[in-house]
Image (cartoon, rainbow, N blue to C red):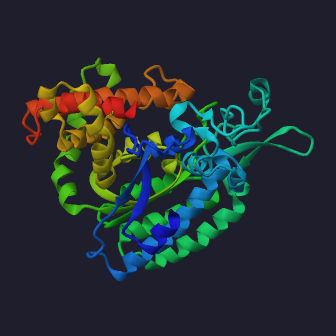
Amino acid sequence: MKKIIYVCLAVALIGFASCQKKETPKEETKSPMQEKVDEFASVRLTTDLSHLSQNEKELIKTFLEIGQIMDDLFWKQAYGNKTDMDTISDKAAREFAMINYGPWERLNNMKPFVAGFGEKPLGANFYPVDMTDEEYNTLKDKNKDNLYTVIRRDKDGKLVVKWYREEYKEELQKVDKLLEKAITLAEDEGLKKYLVERKKAFQTDDYFASDMAWMDMKKSKLDFVCGPIENYEDRRFGSKAAYEAFILVKDEKWSNDLAKFTSMLPQLQKELPVEAKFKKEIPGTDSDLNVYDVIFYGGDCNSGSKTIAINLPNDERVQLKKGARRLQLKNAMKAKFDKILMPIAEQIMVKDQLKNIKFDAFFSNVTFHEVSHGLGIKNTINGKGSVRKALGNQYSGWEEAKADILGLYMVTSLIEKKQITNITQEDALATFIAGILRSV
């Protein structure tokens, strides 16, 4: 699959979990594992590169090389030795393992599907499999729950903390050289500064400066999200970040249509239907809301299902100073609408409401889901640190639920205020119902 992407830079082939299986002749009998593979639809993602300079096109090639390294690093974090998958004799099972980055089905509570494999460790490969909670709790190292460290055993069997820059030194040295090349190719000053800071971050495990630089990157036609970012893979403590990469090409027209909502974020925060103490923080006004076509997913973001929007950085310090950037992946979003949401709607919605299932409503719901991640509070009201840390491994679920329902509230409110005029409240609500069944 990656070979196709390298040859044709405007195209990426990715799998989406689909609610419909392909029809096959009655005489053909598929194995249960082949049916699992066929639940994913291959979708060709295209974008127009004609407006890019030669340097920008060369940049994409360099980003692809870095993205592949991010993919390899995620394999190490999620499973271990990727080549183990080559030993799976059943072709369909082997293909399904590549989709899932290991022999556990991500869309079925990590259920093992290859004989000989038990349950996936909750801590993936971030911790020793045999590590007990008592061992971890008695480990005296202030960096043990840092996003960018792993826990290993020394030669005496005792737990030790290792920074990512040490654990993945060989791969990150290659990334360093490729980023040096990318910096020389970058023409946009904002992109160049971000790449300079990201290069430093990979070698120091301090991503604050590069996240701040990424927030200032306003005019680049290309975006490259890469590094250890989300903590979903660590289901044990939720404290380790997984490597991933997106390569994105900006859609100027759709981005301009959304620009007005960025300036509205402080007012949207004030209007939240909660007590004042839960909305006292003011979201940064440097927040970005833009639309892109995605041409590469690698690592964490490519495992199992594919995301259709990005809301970053996760660092609360950056969010309070500059807000967040919300990137809507239009071509991936349209593919999920066509391949998943519409077939679901046709099964569950009454006929009279099918007319309310619209891509524009889906786009608005997803957009304001991402906006809602930046609203509310980032720090506890009792002064006991960040909400993320207070909720621990429960944070991700609660945060996504908040964004779902608050996003819908925002869309219906903005329709009422005539700020959103291309859909009705009925469109938003009906599409939301089908969308929830798609994603939850």
**Compared to 149, does 56 lie above or below?**
below
| Residue in view at x 53 percent, y 44 percent | 34
Query: Which quadrant of the structure image shows residue 136?
Result: top right
Q: Residue furthest top?
A: 275
x, y (%) of residue 332? 34, 51
x, y (%) of residue 100? 56, 45
User: Number of callouts in the render?
Assistant: 0
Query: Which quadrant of the structure image shows residue 180?
Result: bottom right
| Residue in view at x 18 percent, y 32 percent | 428
Does residue 392 appear anywhere in the picture? yes
**Compared to 302, does 117 lie above or below?**
above
Does residue 387 appear anywhere in the picture? no
**287 left or right of 121 in image:** left
x, y (%) of residue 385? 52, 28
**Compared to 191, does 440 lie above or below?**
above
x, y (%) of residue 76? 67, 51
| Residue in view at x 54 percent, y 30 percent | 389
Q: Which is nearer the eye, 72 or 324?
A: 72
